[in-house]
Image (cartoon, rainbow, N blue to C red):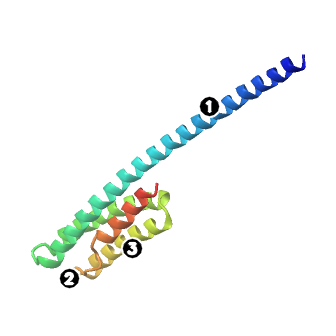
Amino acid sequence: MDAALLAGIFALFGVALQQTFSLLSARITQQQLINQGRRQEHRELYGRYLAQARRVQRLLKELSRSPAVQNEDGRERASAELDILAEITAEIRLVAPGKVAAAVVDLEDSMRRHLRDGGDLPDGLPLGPVITILSADLAHM
């Protein structure tokens, strides 16, 4: 009788352990799916940001190099594109870590200052450093 009781206890323990592993595996799979979705959302958001930042950068270069474009329409167009960039920047600030948020805000601020102050486009507006920071953030997800 003691052997049967011991065998029953081991059987119940085995079932409980199997259920624990099943639940743990399901939880890990669920978390991986959530992280994969989050990574995809960030990739899309960062892609939109870079495309818009590149658009603004081209407009600012046109404004700084071509006197024909330096009219009120050119400035309004650049301002409208900067407003779109600001909306995307706000989205990034909600979901990204501090270093990423700071980089995108700094670039947007630099572009706004250049639009306001005019003159030649400084070397401080390249997208390379921002792309590096965004890529590093995606790699760590």
Crowd around label 3: few <14 · some 14–19 · many ≥20 (10 Å): some
Task: Give the percent coordinates (x, y) of residue 53.
Answer: 29, 64
Q: Quadrant of residue 54?
A: bottom left
Using residue 132 as the reference point, say whether residue 26 is left or right of it.
right
- The reply to whether dot 1 and dot 3 touch (C-beta < 8 Å) is no
Distance CA(mark 1)–CA(mark 3): 47 Å
Location of residue 106 in the rendering, given as x and y in whole percent from the top left corner: 39, 73
Q: Which residue is drawn at the image coordinates 84% and 23% (left, top)?
A: 6
**Which residue in the structure is indicated by mark 1?**
22
Residue at 40% over, 70% down: 103
Task: Tell me if mark 2 has few (under 14), some (14-19) or many (20+) residues whose alpha carbon lies within 10 angstroms of its own.
Answer: few
Q: In which quarter of the image is the N terminus?
A: top right
State the separation of the CA atoms marked 3 and 2: 18 Å
Secondary structure type for disc 2: loop
Q: Position of residue 2 (x, y in %)?
A: 90, 20
Query: For the residue labelled by badge 1, is the local secondary structure a helix, a strand or a loop?
Result: helix
Judge depth for marks 2 and 1 and give the one in front.
1
Task: Residue type at mark 3: give it.
Answer: Asp
Q: Name the residue under label 2.
A: 120
Which residue is tagged 3? 106
Mark positioned earlier in the residue sequence (2 or 1): 1
- Along the line of sight, which residue is nearer the eye, 106 or 128? 128
* Mark closest to the chain's N terminus, 1 or 3: 1
* Real-space Cα separation, disc 2 to disc 1, in angstroms: 62 Å
Q: In this orientation, which residue lies closer to the viewer: 35 or 107?
A: 35
| Residue 76 point in image, percent of width and height | 24, 67
